[in-house]
Image (cartoon, rainbow, N blue to C red):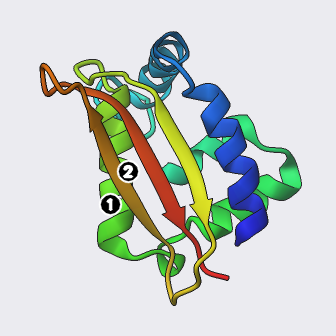
Amino acid sequence: MGSSYDNMATAMNTKFRNKASVQAAAQQFQHKHGPQGKGGNGKIPYRFGNFADDDLGSHDKVKWLIDTGDRNWDAASFNQLEDTIRGNLSDGGPQVPMEFSIQPDGGQKARAEIIEIKDPGTGAIVSYKIILHCRT
């Protein structure tokens, strides 16, 4: 799983590196998946594997879509990952930077660790650190 994850982390870190790039990505996200990322009115619901459509070459894209299938992921962790991204990019979301990293630490299923970085003064979320623990 490592290679397609490394390539996708690089692409996602570029796409979500700062507030301006996240806001631009949020507009694309809402155009493709609707204002809340849940589809409807001719738009498709957001799934984590959808990023492959825009950000990877064909070989990595196929592998990424397979790797992000349900059988490869801890279901609760996968749902939390999708909910975090969907919530961040939705029209009412904070639209803050997201930093992705890969930790190839084995296990039966891949899982995501999501860390909210908050402003110490206001408590508002200022970014997310998302660690993808992938199978080896």
Q: In this view, does 40 lie above or below 49?
A: above
**Number of other residues with Cα within 10 Å of mark 2, as a class: few under 14, some 14 to 19, many 20 or more:** some
Where is residue 60? Give x, y as percent.
Answer: 81, 56
Question: In front here: 11 or 27?
Answer: 11
Residue 45 shows in this picture: no
Let me know if residue 60 appears in the view.
Answer: yes
Q: Residue at x 65, y 60 (%)?
A: 65
Q: Which quadrant, please, contains the C terminus? A: bottom right
**The quadrant where residue 122 appears:** top left
Q: Which amino acid does label 2 sit on?
A: Glu
Where disc 1 sits, the SS reads helix
- Residue 22: x percent and y percent? 49, 20
Please give the name of the residue rendered at 45% of the width and 20% of the height, measured from the top-left corner: 26
| Quarter occupied by the N terminus | bottom right
Residue at the left extreme of this rendering: 122
Q: What residue type is labelled 1?
A: Asn
Near-viewer residue (53 or 119): 119
Rendered image: mark on residue 79: 1
Residue 92, horizontal then vertical, whole percent: 22, 20
The CA distance from mark 1 to mark 2 is 5 Å
- Check whether the beta carbons of the residues at disc 1 and disc 2 lie within 8 A of each other: yes
From the image, tell me which residue sits under label 2. Answer: 82
